[in-house]
Amino acid sequence: MADTLRGKITEAGNAVGEAATKVGNKVSEKAEEVKDWAKEKLHQAQNRADEADQSAQHAQKEACEDAKAQGADCHRS
């Protein structure tokens, strides 16, 4: 415990500095969590888009095969 005013001010400043460091660390941790969450959601969305693309290609291929079976041309522009 500081006996002088200068010592008390120094201790108070150190306490504020430590608290600010703790807050900064907590904010940094949360920001990292948000970044990881966003990256995960981006990958999920990309996977869904890839699945939808594959499904559409499959449906188009089946439609073309059906058209060929009926004697139609499936590659018309």
Image: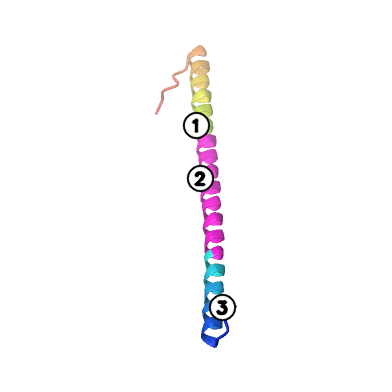
Q: Residue furthest bottom?
A: 5
In percent of the image, x 50 and y 16: which residue is there?
Answer: 65
Q: Is residue 65 above or below residue 3?
A: above
For mark 1, what is the residue? 53
Q: Secondary structure at mark 2?
A: helix
Q: Position of residue 38 (x, y in %)?
A: 53, 48
Across and down, in percent, residue 66 comes to 53, 16
Vertical placement of 14 versus 35: above or below?
below
- Can you tell which quarter of the image residue 74 is in? top left
Q: Position of residue 39 (x, y in %)?
A: 50, 45
Mark 2 = which residue? 39
The residue tagged with tag 1: helix, strand or loop? Answer: helix
The residue carrying pointer 1 sits among few (fewer than 14), some (14 to 19) or many (20 or more) residues within 10 Å by Cα, namely: few
Q: Tell me where the magenta segment starts and ends, as one range.
A: 22-49
Report the quarter where the N terminus lies: bottom right
Query: Count the marks: how many?
Result: 3
Marks 1 and 3, how far apart at CA: 61 Å
Of marks 1 and 3, the one in the foreground: 3
The type of residue carrying mark 3 is: Ala
Q: Which residue is mark 3?
A: 12
* Amino acid type assigned to the residue bearing label 1 in the image: Asp
Label 3: which secondary element: helix
Residue 17 sits above or below residue 26 on the image: below
Q: Residue at x 55, y 39 (%)?
A: 44
Question: Closest to the observer: 40 or 15?
Answer: 15
Name which residue lies at 50% across and 18% down.
67
The answer for how far apart the CA atoms under marks 3 and 2 are is 41 Å
